[in-house]
Image (cartoon, rainbow, N blue to C red):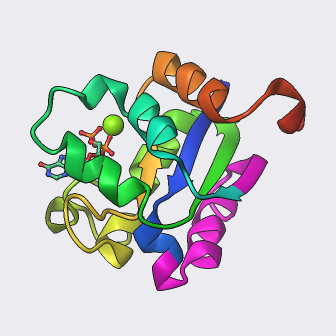
Amino acid sequence: MAERTLSIIKPDGVEKGVIGKIVDRFESNGLKIAAMKMVHLSRKEAEGFYYVHRERPFFASLVDFMVSGPVVLMVLEGNNAIAKNRELMGATNPANADKGTIRKDFATDIERNTVHGSDSPESAAFEISHFFSATEIVN
Ligand code: IDP
Ligand code: MG
């Protein structure tokens, strides 16, 4: 089923200079870039994006990290894009991530884990609309 999902290359991924390598993983595995922009998130944007995690003990630190430098926001499109992106990303904690996944290869730790990917159709719809207007996404 053709689907869209939100991907973020987090500040550690931009800082490490692996934007191109990460985009290549997506394009080489059947995911098309339907929208893309580099931005430096405001605290308000980052807090709104991670609203579901607001009660978690790591929330404040996570928001600090996400506003610490620029990020690359992307809409990825393809068959089962949500699950496919999560598979390419690997586990949240890179120590537990499978070989060959983005987080295994590039992440620093459970917080600075290089990429974000939506985890359900509902979160994908919320997250895409949080950062992109309809006219910014190509068909
Ligand atoms: P996910 O990104 O794999 O979906 P979530 O549980 O949704 O993982 O957590 C969102 C983000 O919060 C993670 O990607 C990571 O950056 C950060 N995070 C998650 N768990 C921890 C933790 O235990 N300590 C610090 N940061 C965490
Ligand atoms: Mg998540």
Q: Residue at x 54, y 50 (%)?
A: 41
Rendered position, 7 above or below 78 = below
- Residue appearing at x 69%, y 61% in the figure: 27
Is residue 118 visible in this depiction of the protein? Answer: no
Q: Quadrant of the N terminus?
A: top right
Residue 48 inside the magenta-drawn segment = no
Q: Is residue 30 inside the magenta stretch?
A: yes
- The percent position of residue 138, horizontal first and vertical second, equals 89, 38
* Residue 135 seen in this snapshot: yes
Residue at 37% x, 72% y is: 100
- The residue nearer to you, when weighing 108 against 58, is 58
Left or right? Give the position of 90 relative to 139: left
Q: Quadrant of ligand 2?
A: top left
In the picture, residue 4 is in which quadrant? top right
Residue at the outermost top position: 122
Q: List x then y, in percent, for residue 37.
A: 73, 54
Please name whichever residue, 80 or 21, is drawn nearer the observer in this view of the structure.
21
Left or right relative to 93: residue 132: right
The magenta-colored residue range is: 15-37
Image vertical order of residue 6 relative to residue 36, above or below? above
Residue 85 lies left or right of residue 108; in this view the side is right
Residue 136, x across and y down, in percent: 85, 37
Quarter of the image with the C terminus in it: top right
Image label count: 0
Q: Position of residue 42 (x, y in %)?
A: 52, 47
Residue extending farthest front:
43
Which quarter of the figure has residue 38? bottom right
Query: Left or right: where does residue 63 sit relative to residue 43?
Result: left
The correct choice, above or below, for 124 with respect to 137 in the image is: above
Depth order, front residue of 80/130: 130
As drawn, the residue found furthest toward the bottom would be 17
